[in-house]
Amino acid sequence: MTAQARRDDLIAAALDLFGTRAPELVTVDDIVARAEVSRPLFYRYFPSLRELQMQALRTVTDGLVDRLATLEEGPPEERLRAAVRGLVDVAAHYREGYVALLRSGSVIATSETDAAIDEVRNRAVELILEALAIPEPSPLVLLTLRCWTAVVEGALLSWLQEGTVPRETLDGWLVDQLTAMLAATDAHLATTP
């Protein structure tokens, strides 16, 4: 197995464990047992548990950015719905890692994870502007889109933790939220001198 393949295997083991418990509760022993490797081999690839946690959580954010980057062709609303479906899929796939990434007070939260989250948020705003063909958005439109990304994050956290809304309802509701928010912004811009 190549060095990169071994690193990826350890990250996959950590993410698999994050599916059953919070990252801060997963130990090196848990990871080496899941990956079927020794502790010394673990430390050959990662200097610390914290480094592996960061790489695993980076895998989640990279998955979100990659999903956003592969928008379908078609009308803006269809593209947006596909992007939201993709985000929900990635969040569900990496459930515990996603929750740990966005949960306040997590021992995993650092300036590096904050930067990774900001990258996902900024990419989402860029793609929405692109899909809506808005090359130079007003400050109010940018504020609307940034607020909507907070709505998406909050909704996904609630959905992952509580599971009270059916999956097929979540996508459409989130897109409808953005549509309503942009309509309110447009109405405000139309009445503002």
Image: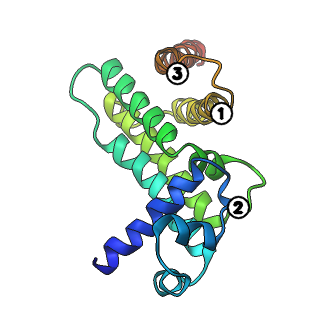
Nearer to us: label 3 or label 2: 2
Res 174 label: 3
Work out which quarter of the rendered image holds the N terminus and state it.
bottom left
**Depicted 8 relative to depicted 48: above or below:** above
**Depicted 49 relative to depicted 96: above or below:** below
Q: Earlier in the sequence, mark 1 or mark 2?
A: 2
The image shows residue 26 at horizontal and vertical percentages of: 66, 62
Nearer to us: label 1 or label 2: 2
Amino acid under disc 2: Glu
Residue 109, can we see it? no
Quote the CA–CA distance across marks 3 and 2.
Answer: 30 Å
At 55% from the left and 82% from the top, the residue drawn is 39
The image shows residue 175 at horizontal and vertical percentages of: 47, 20
Residue 52, can we see it? yes
Dividing the picture into quarters, in which one does residue 107 lie?
Answer: bottom right
At 53% from the left and 87% from the top, the residue drawn is 40
Q: Secondary structure at mark 2?
A: helix
Judging by the rendered image, the residue that carries numbered circle 1 is: 154
Observer-nearest of 34 and 81: 34
Q: Residues within 10 Å of mark 1 (few under 14, many from 20)?
A: some
Judging by the rendered image, the residue that carries numbered circle 2 is: 24
Amino acid under disc 3: Leu
The image shows residue 43 at horizontal and vertical percentages of: 53, 85
